[in-house]
């Protein structure tokens, strides 16, 4: 995370081999104290030739990250101690506000077989040689006993990869080192939308279960297209690194019918021919980074729905004219009035 700590002050007293920290304060980045504060008290010293540190820190709306895609403000209390080689960190934190923007694509990286050389001939960007098993210079491998409870609060928002929602819940950060911490707990979505197949779907239920790895929770998310007589949408399961998306309908329908309701908002009227066209349209939408032409065009026009229904002929010889459907939801806008 980008550093967000600014000015600070320290008031301490030396008593023999002990240093008593009466006041230690850091200001978070922000104008006129809007970045929050971190205050700490404790003592440090040498006992029997070994370092010992005991600190208690209090966070008050501290901006822990100021990156444009990672904004995080936290409050709470943390205790840290060092006794010889053993470091412990425990406490309880509450997220006052968070905005996490997920990138649509991962950061491109060079392959292991690619070496970039500078004009001087030196290799740049090469990986450092692996350290031997006896090396202890990596600070992340030092033993650190973690036991921190993290409450996500009421304003933790996640945006990106088609989803825009808030999440709530409590997680436990544990581990024996900073290299491989574990995150355990369950969080739930609170409202929000998910864009798929060129449509904006309402997230009705969403559960993320953390069982250890920080970046790979198990997913169980259901998003429904609103304002239809047929209940239809998408269901996301699997994990964050390997999600599985499938069509959903209640009562159950064939996939072609689910796709028709989801894309054009009605049942398929032309049998297999229309279903084939819908499948091609769905593949085009899924393959597009912007959610398909209709999704991108609707977004640029400020619309939530933009669809076209072509002309068709019935068995009695009558002809139904084509129609363009434009849709805009006002409920979310009017809710705050």
Image: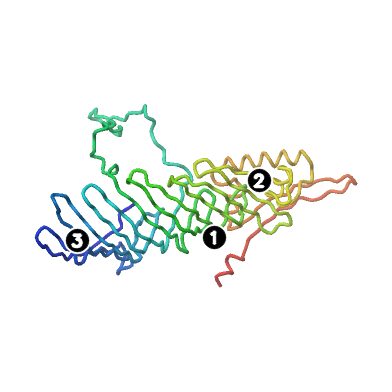
Graded by Cα atoms within 10 Å as few (under 14), some (14 to 19) or many (20 or more), the crowding at tag 3 reads some
Q: Position of residue 324 (x, y in %)?
A: 70, 53
* Distance from Cα at disc 3 to Cα at disc 2: 59 Å
Q: Is residue 92 left or right of residue 259?
A: left
Q: Position of residue 177 (x, y in %)?
A: 32, 45
On screen, 119 above or below 22? above
Q: Check the image and name the residue furthest to the left.
A: 16
Q: Is residue 233 left or right of residue 214?
A: right
Q: Check the image and name the residue furthest to the front.
A: 48
Q: Residue at x 40, y 47 (%)?
A: 182
Q: Which mark is residue 247?
A: 2
Label count reads 3
On screen, 54 above or below 179? below
Q: Nearer the viewer, residue 141 or 189?
A: 141
* SS for callout 3: strand
Q: Nearer the viewer, residue 184 or 288?
A: 184
Q: Position of residue 279 (x, y in %)?
A: 68, 40
> Mark 3 sits on what residue?
43
Q: Is residue 72 left or right of residue 244?
A: left
* Distance from Cα at disc 3 to Cα at disc 1: 43 Å
Q: Residue at x 21, y 66 (%)?
A: 23
> Mark 1 sits on what residue?
190
């Amino acid at each position: 995370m980008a550093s967000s700590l600014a000015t600070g002050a320290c008031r301490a007293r030396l008593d023999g081999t002990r240093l008593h920290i009466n006041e230690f304060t850091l200001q978070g980045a922000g104008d006129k104290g809007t970045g929050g504060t971190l205050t700490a008290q404790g003592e440090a010293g040498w006992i029997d030739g070994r370092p010992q540190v005991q600190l208690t820190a209090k966070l008050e709306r501290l901006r822990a990250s100021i990156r444009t895609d990672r904004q995080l403000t936290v409050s709470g209390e943390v205790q840290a101690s060092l006794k010889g080689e053993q470091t412990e960190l425990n406490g309880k934190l509450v997220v006052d506000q968070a905005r996490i923007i997920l990138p649509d694509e991962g950061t491109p990286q060079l392959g292991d077989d690619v070496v970039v050389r500078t004009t001087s001939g030196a290799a740049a960007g090469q990986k450092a040689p692996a350290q031997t098993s006896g090396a202890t210079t990596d600070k992340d491998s030092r033993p650190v006993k973690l036991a921190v409870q993290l409450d996500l609060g009421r304003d933790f928002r996640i945006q990106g990869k088609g989803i825009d929602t808030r999440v709530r819940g409590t997680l436990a950060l544990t581990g024996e080192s900073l290299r491989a911490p574990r995150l355990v707990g369950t969080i739930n979505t609170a409202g929000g939308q998910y864009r798929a197949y060129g449509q904006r779907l309402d997230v009705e239920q969403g559960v993320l279960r953390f069982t250890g790895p920080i970046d790979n929770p198990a997913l169980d998310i259901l998003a429904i297209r609103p304002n239809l007589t047929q209940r239809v949408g998408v269901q996301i399961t699997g994990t964050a690194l390997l999600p599985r998306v499938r069509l959903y309908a209640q009562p159950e329908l064939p996939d072609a019918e689910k796709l028709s309701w989801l894309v054009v908002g009605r049942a398929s009227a032309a049998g297999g021919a229309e279903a084939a066209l819908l499948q091609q349209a769905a593949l085009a939408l899924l393959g597009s980074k912007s959610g398909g032409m209709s999704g991108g065009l609707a977004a640029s026009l400020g619309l939530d729905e933009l669809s076209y229904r072509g002309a068709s002929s019935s068995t009695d010889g009558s002809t139904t004219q084509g129609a363009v459907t434009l849709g805009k939801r006002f409920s979310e806008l009017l809710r705050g009035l």
